[in-house]
Image: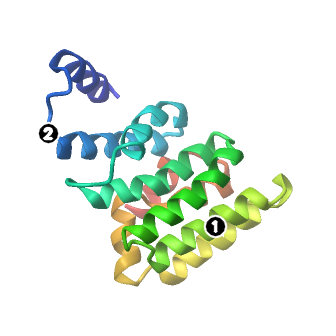
């Protein structure tokens, strides 16, 4: 966290003079870091930075993936209304950018089911999602997506009621 604080201060002093690619990558890493340790509130400003950025030029992979992480952050914060609206806009952006892959479809269907499920049934929705990811985990695209964010560990952490970091330790 100290590194993120130093980076934030350096950005303020420099007046955002870092390259766009570096800013995008660092914002993504900050989101993943905070999510790994259950600090969704601290992830929010970082995800908004990439989510609201115009999708063009640098690091399109991260900018598109930020649309999915936006759903994760707001879901963890309990903002179902925001997640419901963001699912539609994410699907539209992914379709327009030719990024609506089977992985993205699975993630969007998961969030659709999660927002519609009563609280008492949400663990089951997470379990189905974790199973679907595990079934597809040998496919190259799904393995590549795990480099951006480990959705299976995230789902398992929600099932177990622990921070994602505790689950990630089992994987690595």
Is 70 on the left or on the right of 2, as rendered? right
Q: Could you tell me which quadrant the N terminus lies in?
A: top left
Q: Which mark is residue 19?
A: 2
Camera-nearest residue between 166 and 118: 118
Within 10 Å of disc 2 (Cα), the crowding (few <14, some 14-19, many 20+) is few
Residue 39 position (above or below residue 163): above
- Residue 169 shows up from this direction: yes
Is 88 on the left or on the right of 48, as rendered? right
Element on which disc 2 rests: loop
Camera-nearest residue between 39 and 91: 91
Camera-nearest residue between 47 and 122: 47
Using the rendered view, name the quadrant where residue 12 is placed. Answer: top left
Q: Which mark is residue 110?
A: 1
Separation of marks 1 and 2 at Cα, in angstroms: 34 Å
Within 10 Å of disc 1 (Cα), the crowding (few <14, some 14-19, many 20+) is some
Q: Residue at x 74, y 60 (%)?
A: 123
Q: Residue at x 82, y 52 (%)?
A: 119
* Residue 139 coordinates in the image, percent (x, y): 40, 84
């Amino acid at each position: 966290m100290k590194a993120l604080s130093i980076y934030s201060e350096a950005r303020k002093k420099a007046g955002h003079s870092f390259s766009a690619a570096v800013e995008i990558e660092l914002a993504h890493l900050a989101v993943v870091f905070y999510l790994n340790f259950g600090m969704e509130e601290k992830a929010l400003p970082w995800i908004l930075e990439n989510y609201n950025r115009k999708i063009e030029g640098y690091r399109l992979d991260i900018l598109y993936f930020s649309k999915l992480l936006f759903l994760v952050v707001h879901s963890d914060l309990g903002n179902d209304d925001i997640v419901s609206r963001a699912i539609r806009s994410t699907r539209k952006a992914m379709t327009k950018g030719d990024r609506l892959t089977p992985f993205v479809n699975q993630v969007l269907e998961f969030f659709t089911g999660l927002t519609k499920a009563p609280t008492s049934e949400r663990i089951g929705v997470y379990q189905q999602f974790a199973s679907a990811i595990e079934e597809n985990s040998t496919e190259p695209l799904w393995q590549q997506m795990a480099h951006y964010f480990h959705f299976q560990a995230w789902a398992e952490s929600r099932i177990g009621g622990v921070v994602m970091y505790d689950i990630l330790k089992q994987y690595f």
